[in-house]
């Protein structure tokens, strides 16, 4: 396994306490996963302090999603062993997205302390306001109604250098186009199974759903990479020599 590093310094950025806080678990759990080989060992720095990078956090987030799906520790170990050792934290996030797509919609009422624990970090009043504007959190008296499936993603967006307006506009774009794709695919599949028995329809749905989710994620990832490349290439070509 490789250890991801900070792009600016070339070194892992988190202590084990910071990693545990970001992942919303205990230091003891981090160490346990390390002994099981579920996360790579830290890079040992000055004073024999272990340092962790984005790849460690991405693996812990993936493990959390697998647990939410009801997988046993042994099953999680088998799943993680099958992953290529050189996966970047971006690739691991794609795997987590695929796993999370099978989780049922979960909206829960939690205390402020539990909200911070699940977020894996302290949340200022401004942070909570932004999460509320995204539709992820809704204050309810002394507690919060939380969309658990999207909370971690929304928390990561808090550190993205985009305005609240841009984030909300991006959310609307994704919702609009994902719904349009779902409608078109549903129409296509309905035409294929309109004359088939009910059991055949259920079987097709069960087989196609994971394929479609993986295809959409992969296609979007490649399309986004191409768009960013064209954008950066165009920007470089437009600069004066």
Image: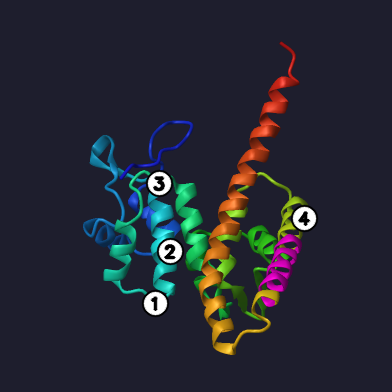
**Residue 189 in magenta?**
yes
Q: What is the C-alpha distance between the residues marked 2 and 1?
A: 18 Å
Q: What is the C-alpha distance between the residues marked 2 and 4?
A: 29 Å
Q: Outermost residue toward the top?
A: 241
Left or right: residue 62 versus residue 160 is left
The answer to whether residue 71 is above or below residue 53 is below
Secondary structure mostly seen in the magenta stretch: helix
Residue 108's x, y, as percent?
57, 80
Instruction: Give the residue drawn at x 55%, y 70%.
Output: 208
Answer whether labels 2 and 1 touch (C-beta < 8 Å).
no
The residue pinned by badge 2 equals: 24
Answer whether labels 3 and 4 touch (C-beta < 8 Å).
no
The residue pinned by badge 4 equals: 169
Residue 232's x, y, as percent?
67, 30
Magenta span covers which residues?
176-190
Classify mark 3: helix, strand or loop: loop
Determine which of the numbered discs, if any, sits on residue 87 in the image. 3
Q: What is the C-alpha distance between the residues marked 2 and 3?
A: 22 Å
Q: What is the C-alpha distance between the residues marked 3 and 4?
A: 30 Å
């Amino acid at each position: 396994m490789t250890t991801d590093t900070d792009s600016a310094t070339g070194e892992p950025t988190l202590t084990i306490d910071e990693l545990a806080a970001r992942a919303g678990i205990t230091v003891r759990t981090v160490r346990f996963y390390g002994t099981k080989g579920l996360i790579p060992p830290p890079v040992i720095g000055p004073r024999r302090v272990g340092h962790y990078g984005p790849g460690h956090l991405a693996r812990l987030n993936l493990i959390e999603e697998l647990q939410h799906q009801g997988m046993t520790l042994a099953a999680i170990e088998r799943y993680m062993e099958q992953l290529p050792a050189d996966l970047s934290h971006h690739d691991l996030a794609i795997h987590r997205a695929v796993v999370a797509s099978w989780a049922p919609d979960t909206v829960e009422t939690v205390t402020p302390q539990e909200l911070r624990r699940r977020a894996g970090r302290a949340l200022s009043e401004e942070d909570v306001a932004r999460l509320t504007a995204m539709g992820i959190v809704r204050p309810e008296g002394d507690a919060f109604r939380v969309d658990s499936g999207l909370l971690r993603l929304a928390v990561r967006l808090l550190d993205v250098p985009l305005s609240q307006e841009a984030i909300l506009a991006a959310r609307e774009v994704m919702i609009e186009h994902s719904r349009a794709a779902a409608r078109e695919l549903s129409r296509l599949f309905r035409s294929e199974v309109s004359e088939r028995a009910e059991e055949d329809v259920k079987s097709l749905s069960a087989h196609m759903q994971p394929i479609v989710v993986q295809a959409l994620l992969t296609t979007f990832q490649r399309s986004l990479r191409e768009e960013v490349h064209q954008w950066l290439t165009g920007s470089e070509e437009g600069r004066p020599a």
